[in-house]
């Protein structure tokens, strides 16, 4: 199951050729071309900003292309809206599905087209039965009668897939479905995807994790700068080939080695920090010029420790000291005043104000420096934003555009710029490169390394082991709310980290 | 932890056991909560003042509740879609005067025609609200706050210093609130039946479920291809039409109608809806709960009156109940969400 499987031989279900789409002066898609066959999982790869999202939205009927042709099951079609895409048998599963939290799972799948009995009344029994049948077909034990509130993102995606099946969709587009899933959830999703494939559906699978692509996909299409670069069977290709096709150049396999490893004074001291039921007795120190990684499985309490240090969450016992001075509990203001910057895991919800401009977002944490007599100086704000945009190579239209118009990687750079503008002495970054393309990822790594070289202490939480190994000087491993290991850069390996993170008994093989 | 819009529970009539059943159980507690508070008020008041449970007072409270619960029915349909209709008090006033004036201008006019006229007046106002909210995409709070003043202004222009009093109204009209079947006022029965039909409609028909979906997640509703604009428009039209009918009833109940009729009614109606367990940000709640909320608030007013307590306490207690209802729902939902989350982790 793990090696790329034989190329699919099914008939072509969908063919998009030379689709183009511009928004104002920005050409988001120049040559969008993809061909999907029945019974295949087809990877769509490209850096953020390569035009993948635009292509997906064209298939979803959300955007109407300026040029190009779309053929579904041999017939040319024009998708005027989401309803037309559904009617053509195309379903799109987004990274974070939008369900109705107050309605049942079954009703979420059938809303607007519930099965009816006499008098146009909803046949609830039939609706539940049909939903249960679909979940049985997918092999997932979801209760169709429960309300959607509280479902994990993985289960929400399953509901969306179930909805697609209930619509008899033959083409299923998954836009970064695994970005927010744990390893076990990814495995389960892949089982569902294999089921879909064996039932003759075509799946377009978008992911930044190349190992996933090799696990689940048979063919691949790579895009770069809005253009189709290659379509090929995956068998015979290597990760390096794909990366080269995506970025158009070779990437250094490993981020550059840190220079100032742990030379400075301790900046942050955390002593026996405890939050009942979440984490226990966490003691750690981060020195100036050092990058410390906090590794561990999702749910091991890493983000919670970071949030407690920054003062977002309360803690029950212990102390947090910055440069010798204790921080007040549960006070982000005090943490910021002491020189801590915090780049949260969920940049859309917590890191950015999506409707505000690039410029305003960059300036958000530095308003006190930009104001005169209580009024923010627009010129200074603009100068600061434009300075950081250049330094971090943020790709943007105008600085006054809403930050929501940027790609994920560039949004992350805006969050970084926001904190760097305050010249922090400690920067906490939580999953800094989640959902970011390979090229930008390398830039973020370089940026963190440069920061450390300039004397900033960095505490990085990351689930990506290559990132942990490549960027950090020291690695602390958490398991079930406790610190279980400390590894030096030289002594660390993926095996060592996973052994500590999973516990000896499980990892021993 | 992602932020969700004020989470609330949802009536889920025939869900299977499991987590769905959990939601159902909690909701039953929520609605029986109103009944318990109601019972406590009635019991305490009756101990102090035996007249409170006399048939005359029961009839008085039920008649008072009828118009109130009718308005709550229409308001619930609007609130479920994550909107609010603040113009109902003004619509009641306008409809009350114009319909009563019909009797004065055309003696002998038939009562059903007057009710239809009231319905038409309310429907027209509701259509204006609906168009501005659904097509104009103006927030309903602003639209209906504006129409609250505009309709009241039109009312004052028409009525001036006049008033219609009981002498110009036919007795058969004034008797409507007094007619009873087995001690229960006819109009209370009629409103209860309407609420029952409303509950059945919201539960059983696609368009009814759409209202819940729209309030639960408007963006998802649009993506799912639901006719969001049309449904929201219809909710406002229905709320307006119901307010028009309630206005006619108002005239029959009070007999004297001037330009201040129904002033401030809208906030009482919204209070009843929220106390009754309908989420102020839409997506969950039931018209039966809203009707019970109206009954509770009317009962409290009456109890305080019977006990000779200052009407000031009336408003203070309403406010207290409102806070209680909202914080209770908030707590229940948080507990429920985490319970659902736990029951949802099937792996590891």
Image: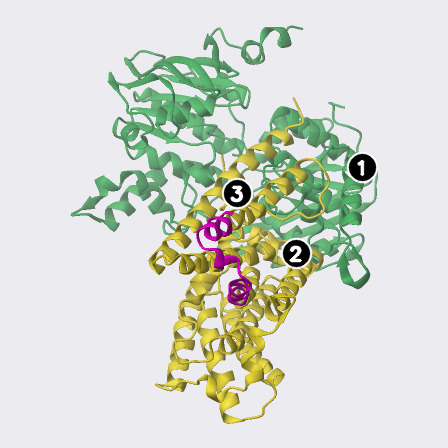
Chain colours: A green, B yellow
A62 or B274, which is in the foreground?
B274
Secondary structure, mark 1, is helix
Between label 3 and label 2, give the one nearer the viewer.
Answer: 2
Residue linked to disc 1: A137
Q: Is residue A186 visible?
A: yes
* Quadrant for the C terminus of chain A in the image: top right
- Image coords of residue A379 (percent x, y): 24, 49
Would residue B299 be found to the left or right of residue A317 on screen?
right
* Residue drawn where x is 69% and y is 59% of the image: B200
Above or below, comparing residue A137 to residue B32 in the picture: above
Q: Main secondary structure of the magenta part?
A: helix
Residue linked to disc 3: A49
Q: Earlier in the sequence, mark 1 or mark 3?
A: 3
Residue linked to disc 2: B209
* Residue drawn where x is 28% and y is 42% of the image: A384
> What is the CA distance from the residue labelled 1 to the residue labelled 3?
36 Å
> What is the CA distance from the residue labelled 1 to the residue labelled 2?
27 Å
Given the image, what chain letter belongs to the residue carrying mark 1? A
A423 or A325, which is in the foreground?
A325
- Image coords of residue A179 (percent x, y): 58, 33
Above or below, comparing residue B82 to residue A361 in the picture: below
Given the image, what chain letter belongs to the residue carrying mark 2? B
Location of residue A189 by image quarter: top right
Location of residue A443 by image quarter: top left
**Identity of the residue furthest to the left in this view:** A373
Tag 3 and tag 2 share a subunit: no
**What range is drawn magenta here?**
B40-65
Mark 2 burial class by Cα count in 10 Å: few <14, some 14-19, many 20+:
many
- Number of numbered tags placed on the structure image: 3
A18 or B123, which is in the foreground?
B123
């Amino acid at each position: 199951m793990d090696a790329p499987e034989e190329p699919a031989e099914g008939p072509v279900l969908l063919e998009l050729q030379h689709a183009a789409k511009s928004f104002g002066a920005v050409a988001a898609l120049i040559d969008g071309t993809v061909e999907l066959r029945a019974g295949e999982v087809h990877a769509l790869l490209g850096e953020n900003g390569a035009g993948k999202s635009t292509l997906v939205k064209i298939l979803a009927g959300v955007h109407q292309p300026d040029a190009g042709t779309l053929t579904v099951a041999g017939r040319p079609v024009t998708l005027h809206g989401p309803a037309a895409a559904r009617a053509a048998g195309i379903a799109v599963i987004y990274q974070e599905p939008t369900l109705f939290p107050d309605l049942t799972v079954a009703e979420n799948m059938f809303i607007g087209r519930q099965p009816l009995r006499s008098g146009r009344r909803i046949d609830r029994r039939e609706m539940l039965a049909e939903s249960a049948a679909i979940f049985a077909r997918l092999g997932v034990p979801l209760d169709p009668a429960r309300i959607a509130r509280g479902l994990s993102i993985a289960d929400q995606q399953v509901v969306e897939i179930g909805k697609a099946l209930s619509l008899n969709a033959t083409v299923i587009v998954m836009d970064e479905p695994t970005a927010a899933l744990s390893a076990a959830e990814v495995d389960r999703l892949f089982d569902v995807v294999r089921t879909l494939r064996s039932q003759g559906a075509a799946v377009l699978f978008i992911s930044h994790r190349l190992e996933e692509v090799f696990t689940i996909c048979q063919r691949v299409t790579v895009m770069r700068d809005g253009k189709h670069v290659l379509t090929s069977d995956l068998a015979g290709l290597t990760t390096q080939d794909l990366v080269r096709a995506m970025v158009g150049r070779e990437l250094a396999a490993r981020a550059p080695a840190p220079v100032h490893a742990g030379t400075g004074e301790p900046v942050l001291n955390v002593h026996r920090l405890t939050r009942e039921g979440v984490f226990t007795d966490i003691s750690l120190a981060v020195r100036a010029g050092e990058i410390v990684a906090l590794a561990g499985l999702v749910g091991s309490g890493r983000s919670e420790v970071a949030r407690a240090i920054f003062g977002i969450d309360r803690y029950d016992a212990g102390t947090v000291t910055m440069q010798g001075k204790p921080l007040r509990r549960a006070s982000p203001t005090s943490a910021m005043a002491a020189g801590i910057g915090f780049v949260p895991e969920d940049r859309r919800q917590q890191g950015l104000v999506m409707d505000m401009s690039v410029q305003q977002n960059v300036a958000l944490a530095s308003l006190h420096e930009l104001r005169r007599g209580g009024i923010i100086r627009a010129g200074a704000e603009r100068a600061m934003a434009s300075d950081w945009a250049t330094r971090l190579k943020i790709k943007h239209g105008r600085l006054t555009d809403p930050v929501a118009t940027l790609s994920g990687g560039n949004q992350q750079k805006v969050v970084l710029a926001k904190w760097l503008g305050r010249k922090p002495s400690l920067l906490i970054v939580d999953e800094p490169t989640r959902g970011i393309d390979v090229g930008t990822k390398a830039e973020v790594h370089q940026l963190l390394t440069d920061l450390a070289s300039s004397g900033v202490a960095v505490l990085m939480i990351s689930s990506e082991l290559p990132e942990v190994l490549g960027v950090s000087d020291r690695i602390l491993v958490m398991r079930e709310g406790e610190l279980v290991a400390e590894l030096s850069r030289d002594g660390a390996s993926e095996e060592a980290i996973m052994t500590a993170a999973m516990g000896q008994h499980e990892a021993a093989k | 932890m992602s932020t969700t819009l004020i989470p609330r529970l949802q009536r889920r009539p025939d869900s299977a056991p499991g987590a769905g059943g959990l939601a159902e159980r909690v909701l039953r507690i929520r609605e029986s909560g109103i009944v318990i508070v109601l019972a406590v008020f009635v019991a305490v008041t009756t101990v102090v003042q035996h007249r409170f449970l006399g048939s005359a007072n029961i009839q008085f409270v039920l008649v008072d509740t009828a118009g109130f619960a009718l308005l709550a029915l229409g308001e619930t349909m609007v609130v479920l879609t994550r909107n609010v209709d603040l113009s109902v008090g003004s619509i009641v006033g306008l409809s009350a005067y114009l319909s009563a004036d019909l009797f004065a201008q055309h003696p002998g006019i038939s009562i059903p025609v007057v009710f239809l006229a009231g319905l038409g007046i309310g429907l027209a106002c509701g259509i204006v609200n609906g168009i501005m909210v659904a097509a104009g995409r103006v927030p309903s709070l602003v639209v209906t706050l504006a129409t609250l003043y505009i309709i009241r202004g039109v009312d004052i222009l028409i009525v001036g210093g006049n008033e219609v009093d009981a002498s110009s109204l036919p007795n058969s009209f004034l008797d409507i609130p007094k007619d009873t079947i087995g001690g229960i006022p006819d109009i209370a029965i009629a409103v209860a039946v309407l609420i029952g039909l409303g509950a059945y409609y919201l539960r059983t028909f696609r368009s009814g479920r759409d209202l819940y979906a729209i309030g639960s997640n408007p963006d998802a509703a649009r993506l799912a291809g639901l006719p969001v604009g049309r449904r929201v428009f219809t909710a406002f039209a229905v709320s307006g039409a119901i307010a028009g009918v309630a206005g006619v009833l108002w005239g029959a109940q009070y007999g004297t109608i001037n330009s201040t009729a129904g002033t401030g009614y809208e906030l009482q109606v919204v209070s009843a809806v929220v106390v009754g367990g309908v989420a102020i940000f839409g997506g969950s709640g039931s018209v039966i709960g809203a009707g019970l909320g109206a009954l509770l608030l009317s009962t409290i007013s009456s109890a305080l009156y019977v006990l000779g307590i200052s009407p000031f306490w009336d408003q203070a207690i309403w406010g207290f109940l409102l806070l209680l209802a909202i914080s209770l729902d908030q707590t229940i939902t948080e507990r429920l969400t985490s319970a659902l989350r736990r029951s949802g982790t099937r792996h590891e």
